[in-house]
Image (spheres, helix red, strand yellow):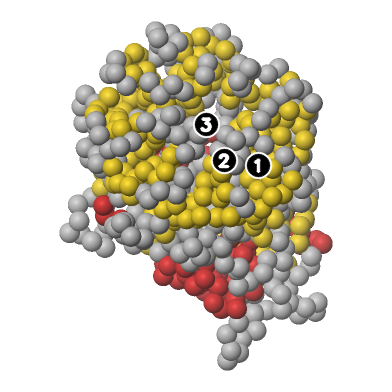
Amino acid sequence: MAAPSGPHSSPADLFPAQFARTRRFSLGVPRQFTVSPDGERVLFVRGTSGTDPVSRLWLYEDGAERLLADPLGPGFEEEDPREVPPEERARRERARETSSGVVSYATDASMRLAVFALAGALWAVPVDGSEPRRLPTAGPAVDPRPSPDGSLIAYVSGGALRTVRADGTDDRALAEPEGAHITYGLSDYVSQESIGRARGYWWSPRGDALLVARADTSGVELRYLADPAHPDRPPRTLLYPAAGTANAKVSLHLVRTSGEHTAVRLPEAAGGGHPEGPWTDRAFEYVVAADWDDRGPLVSVQTRDQRTVHVLEADERTGATRTVHREHDPAWVVLRPGTPLRLPSGALVVPARPGGDTQGLDIGGITTPPGLEVREVLGAADGRVYFTGGDEPTEIHVWSFDTEGRGPARVSGVPGVHTAAAGGPTVVLDSRTPDGHTVTVLRAGTETGRIAVLVEEPLVTPRPLDLSLGRRELRSRLHLPSWHRPGDGPLPVLLSPYAGHGMQLVLKVRTWWTAVAQWFAEQGFAVLVTDGRGTPGRGEAWEKSVHGDRLTAVLEDQIDALHTAARSHPVLDLTRVAMRGWSFGGYLAAAAVLRHPEVFHAAVAGAAPADRRLYDTHWEERFLGHPDVLPENYARNSLLEEAASLTRPLMLVHGLADDNVSVAHTLRLSAALLAAGRPHTVLPLSGAGHLVGSDRTASGLLLLERDFLRQALGA
């Protein structure tokens, strides 16, 4: 039964436009919190409303917010996207940044000075309320960071790492590229996109030296990203290491502000204990984490086959390294964000398996309890280590661990997804719950204030049914139309999962994807969202069950959830079932109609990585190995090989400017379908990247998806 229609529009009719203008309800959300070491001050970025796309820098102090830097205010010029340096554009794309203005910043150790870049211009802002000042630089500045005492500011320009004094004098290069393919101080593509290491340099605590990443991309394959809508513009060159090809060669160097360089002597390959496999590569090819604390530089390296990680201490005088922790895994070593962390006592905080296959922590020799799944280490303050995790996969809580050994205590209360930033006795608790989004400032455990969340309220109110389905207790959510009543008749079913590695949708939150699911429900669908095998939060065996095969188990879980839900909710019409998704979810949607047309009757596949050989090294080789050694894994997971089996309506959607999942994936799948004589629909999105940001495109896409699915299912 379709949604009721009439001469008057409902709030749901206006939702696509709201979804687009709020950029997935991301505008007006405070983020990137930094708490001063004494806990007295909090810095963050946020716009002025839920539709303001320009982020400002704010200070929270004494229970009140104060604007520190407004890119639209006096003295600033509005940022022209064309003037943003290409390295910064790439960083924003990797971070899925939806706004402009002050989108990132860094501070000195005492949080008295903040710096940021706008369209390549370097700005410094004293936190005491003095006016922001622009500092002269030798070229467009990328990723500026002040020294711990605030006297110097480092930045990258033209691939060189430079410093300038905080008063704008004495700009000089500390490390200059030896060739066109060399950069100092920048993170390479794979480190940013797939590893999660966004930074390329780290100050010493004394401010007299930096640990600097040098990336040599001379062996990395080139891709050319053209804009067919503007044939007069030259294509953009992208360095992209596809599976089985050469990565950037990353080395680390100790660079003193006086100009001396010392190479960090990283080990070349893993030795004993490294697990063997059908494809084994022991070379330490990835620098996955780095930092420099009072005890010296600390570095983590990972082998090309991802089965071994070593944590290394580096001697700041000689560059010699010593392994202080090892991890091995026959599938891959999970990189836990925020680890390793070294406490002032010298104790390490590293991943551990406290019992079964729970992903826990070892905190200076004390292990978190079995069953407490650790997601991320947030940092240490006031004698406590803060991390996120929990024992129920649909909730993520903030925990503190007393380093005196009194064990973990939960900081967050109500069900939801929580994270935090801490400094001294102050914790900024960022909470997304079924009731909305709040940011609470706690001091010594007591609420002292809140930071305003200015996001718009969605025009549709999510009203999901929380389900645990089948023998695997698959966490699912079912969205039904608010207007549907018992006896109204069955509804066509729309599965709307991500279901891939590293991301969950079935969480006890109200967020953009729950609002989108409810909007589709209001259009006349029963919408089912399920997290199955391969998703995080349920132990390493669950997460690694997709090793070697990224589709079979994942599709089985979606089908199992669908059929189990239908048995208890007969309103689900199993003769009219579709799937929609984006990225891995799009890949899964296309695979659903190719492999199981007896279950799925239509699909919308957005930005689907259909040919796994085209995706990047670190991400794809984690699951499927090296394509030259294990070509059968890539063939088994390629949708191109199955194009001739399509018998159901399929819409392929892709942004032509997507530099993460290249549009070549969709074009190759479309060509294979055409060669097999299989009709299908292709919707190219001009100028869109992996995250569709244009207001008109984002709103129009929702409507086109709805209309395609209605027609395909006869809804």
Q: Are marks 1 and 3 in contact (CB under 8 Å)?
A: no
Residue denoted by label 2? 35
- Numbered mark located on residue 499 in the image: none
The disc, 1 or 3, on the residue closer to the chain's N-terminal end is 1
Q: Residue at x 54, y 33 (%)?
A: 623
Picture coordinates of residue 387, whole percent (x, y): 66, 35
Badge 3 amino acid: Arg
- Residue 253 sits in which quadrant? top left
Q: For label 3, count other residues whose C-alpha is less than 10 Å away and answer few (under 14), some (14-19) or many (20+).
A: many
The disc, 2 or 1, on the residue closer to the chain's N-terminal end is 2
Residue denoted by label 1? 427
Q: For label 1, count other residues whose C-alpha is less than 10 Å away and answer few (under 14), some (14-19) or many (20+).
A: many
Residue 400 appears anywhere in the view: yes
Q: Are marks 2 and 1 in contact (CB under 8 Å)?
A: yes
Picture coordinates of residue 698, whole percent (x, y): 45, 66
Which image quarter is the C terminus in?
A: bottom right
Q: CA distance from mark 1 to mark 3?
A: 35 Å
Q: CA distance from mark 3 to mark 2?
A: 35 Å
Q: Residue at x 66, y 34 (%)?
A: 386
Picture coordinates of residue 554, whole percent (x, y): 63, 45
